[in-house]
């Protein structure tokens, strides 16, 4: 199998790592091979200190249209054996991305459904083409969510709205996703690649170590007391003081010039 046939492709472009779902004929539905490929890509990204930002996207007409529903068909005992082979590597990959110091961007277009929506919600930032459509979809299959959406969704939109999105599994567009805070930006479909690149380059030129501390603080904040959060903020700030980027940021500010961060 050539790289072009891989269900998930990892492309390294200088400081930008690109994880691309590559099953366009089935709208990048998550199969066992795709989930394993996703995990492998996440591990490679985490092991490469040269990466300063990660972009996740999908080939063809969709980002990711959920799980491969054909794997869910058949006797319950057989399905119970197949589903973990998709879910376990998918979940492990998501945990790796959440723990990365590098910001993770979802570049969304077409269908963002089921596990694909869970993946989009799990990233740090999301930019969507104006033709993107969203649905959590699990209720339509008679099952509950995976891919961390039951954790991320109430944190993004509040419990009541999360219940609506999950229980009704309605389809909504990019404008509504922006209004709800599920994505950060909506751009014309023709501009998605260029706008994603612009955002990725901006983050790739930023203070990567500090970004990692920001991610950890924000992601854990709702599970901690104010006292504990303040202590972790102090610890994070102290760790940043020892970086070259902190010294550069301070010197640039005092010199009234743009900082040139190295990511270290």
Image: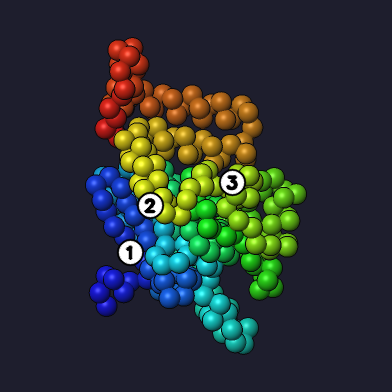
Which disc number belongs to residue 193?
2
Q: CA distance from mark 3 to mark 2?
A: 18 Å
Mark 1 and mark 2 in contact? Answer it, CB < 8 Å: no
Mark 1 and mark 2: span between their CA atoms?
17 Å
The mark found on residue 104 in the picture is none
Q: Nearer the viewer, residue 34 or 257?
A: 257
Question: Closest to the observer: 94 or 238?
Answer: 94
Within 10 angstroms of label 3, few (less than 14), some, or many (20 or more) residues? some
Q: Is residue 254 left or right of residue 157?
A: left
Q: Which residue is mark 1?
A: 9
Please say if 193 is above or below 254: below
Q: Is residue 245 left or right of residue 151?
A: left
- Residue at 31%, 35% in the rendered image: 205
- Mark 3 and mark 2 lie on one chain; the one further toward the N terminus is 3
Question: Which numbered dot is residue 178?
Answer: 3
Residue 161 as seen in the image, left or right of residue 24: right
Find out whether the residues at labels 3 and 2 contact each other: C-beta distance under 8 Å: no
Please tell me which of labels 1 and 2 falls first in the chain.
1
The residue lying at 69 percent from left, 68 percent from top is 139
Q: How is the image coloured?
A: rainbow
Kindly state the secondary structure of the residue where label 1 is placed: strand
């Amino acid at each position: 199998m050539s790289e072009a046939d891989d269900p998930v492709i990892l492309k390294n472009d200088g400081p930008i790592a690109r994880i691309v779902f590559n099953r366009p004929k089935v709208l990048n539905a998550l199969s066992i091979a795709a989930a394993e490929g996703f995990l492998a890509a996440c591990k490679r990204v985490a092991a490469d200190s040269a990466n300063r930002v990660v972009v996740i996207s999908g080939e063809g007409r969709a980002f990711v249209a959920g799980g491969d529903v054909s794997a869910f068909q058949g006797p319950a005992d057989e399905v119970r054996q197949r589903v973990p082979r998709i879910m376990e590597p998918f979940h492990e990959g998501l945990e790796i991305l959440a723990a990365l110091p590098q910001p993770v961007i979802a570049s969304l277009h077409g269908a963002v459904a089921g596990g694909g929506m869970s993946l989009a919600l799990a990233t740090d930032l999301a930019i969507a083409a104006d033709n993107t459509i969203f649905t959590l979809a699990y209720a339509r299959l008679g099952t509950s969510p995976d891919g961390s959406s039951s954790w991320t969704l109430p944190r993004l939109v509040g419990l009541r709205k999360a219940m609506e999105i999950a229980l009704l599994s309605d389809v909504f567009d990019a404008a509504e996703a922006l209004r709800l805070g599920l994505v950060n930006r909506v751009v014309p479909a023709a501009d998605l690649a260029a706008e994603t690149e612009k955002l990725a380059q901006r983050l790739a030129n930023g203070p990567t170590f500090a970004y990692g501390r920001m991610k950890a603080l924000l992601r854990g904040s709702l599970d901690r007391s104010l006292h504990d959060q303040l202590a972790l903020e102090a610890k994070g700030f102290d760790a940043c003081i020892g970086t070259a980027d902190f010294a550069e940021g301070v010197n640039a500010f005092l010199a009234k010039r743009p900082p040139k961060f190295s990511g270290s």
